[in-house]
Amino acid sequence: MTDHVDPSLLAALAREGLDGVEGAFAYGGGRDLVKPGLGDRQRTHLCIADGRGRTHDLYLKRYGPESLVARLKRFLKTGRSASPARIECENIRAARAAGVPTMQAVSWGEEPGLLPRRGYLVVAAVPGDALERAGREFLARADQQGAVEEFTRRLADLVRALHGAGLVHRDLYSSHIFLHDAPGGPELHLIDLARAFRPRWRTFRWFVKDLAQLKCSMDGAWVASCWEAFLRRYLGDGAEGELVRYNRAVDRKVAAMRSRARRNKGRG
């Protein structure tokens, strides 16, 4: 997976002012995607036509000023103090270099200085829809076609490639894995790598957290019938002794997540 970007697309972005921080924050086109918890972040869906008559499906992420406290917390946890735009761009490139199917970073920028404030990132859309929305119907259809095993292998390979590169996602829910039911088999892409990082210690704990988020958010029928096969594929040959350890740790984390969700729902 290379980071080569079509020059005609870059030229189209420049015409829209999406080749620098000022232009990105002044941009008024596209469709804003609003959801709770974004804070000073803004996400916009774009369809940009290039000079060759092609339309590109893109997302513009704009990161507003970040507090010193937020920057310090991230540095203490991840050892990184760059702007969120730079961090997500670097995460995408690292994941792609490791063979993880994910977005392509098309353009990015940040305000200069020792403590850059605003930043932006343009990424190419991935095909399909989130597993959270499309997974159940696909798996029911795939079960009739005997394709669930291939889906399980590809999902395990995606997570294994991510963790094999030392990266953790931190939000590895089914809403952040996109499924495209292609003629050659299910294609999976990981999105939203803003919070991903390489843990400097307690790596097993972080891997387990990712796996628990995935297990907790996947279709229950798939978990019941395919989780063992997924975990075996994820761990790889010769890791039979790790299977019990991982399963116990993941199930403890899933139980804790569900307990916390029930408490939060009760408070609401």
Image (spheres, rainbow, N blue to C red):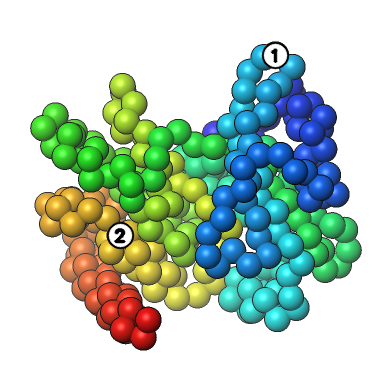
Residue sitting nearer the eye, 161 or 255: 255
Identified at 88% across, 63% down, the residue is 113
* 81 displayed left or right of 173: right
Q: Residues within 10 Å of mark 1 (few under 14, many from 20)?
A: few
Say which quadrant the C terminus sits in. bottom left
> Label 2, on which residue?
217
* 77 displayed left or right of 135: right
Residue sitting nearer the eye, 181 or 266: 266
Residue sitting nearer the eye, 24 or 205: 24
Q: Residues within 10 Å of mark 2 (few under 14, many from 20)?
A: some
Nearer-N-terminus badge (2/1): 1
At label 2, the amino acid type is Ser
Identified at 62% across, 23% down, the residue is 55
Q: Mark 2 and mark 1: span between their CA atoms?
A: 41 Å
Q: Secondary structure at mark 1?
A: loop
Measured from the top left, where is residue 92 in percent x and y? 58, 48
User: Does the image show residue 160?
Assistant: no
Q: Secondary structure at mark 2?
A: helix
Identified at 73% across, 70% down, the residue is 66
Q: Find the residue positioned furthest to the top.
A: 52
Q: Quadrant of residue 77?
A: bottom right
Q: Quadrant of residue 82?
A: bottom right
At label 1, the amino acid type is Arg
Measured from the top left, where is residue 213 in percent x and y? 35, 64
Measured from the top left, where is residue 244 in percent x and y? 18, 68
Residue sitting nearer the eye, 237 or 2: 2
Specify the label residue 195 is tagged with.
Answer: none
Specify the label residue 52 is tagged with.
Answer: 1
Q: Are marks 2 and 1 in contact (CB under 8 Å)?
A: no
Say which quadrant the N terminus sits in. top right
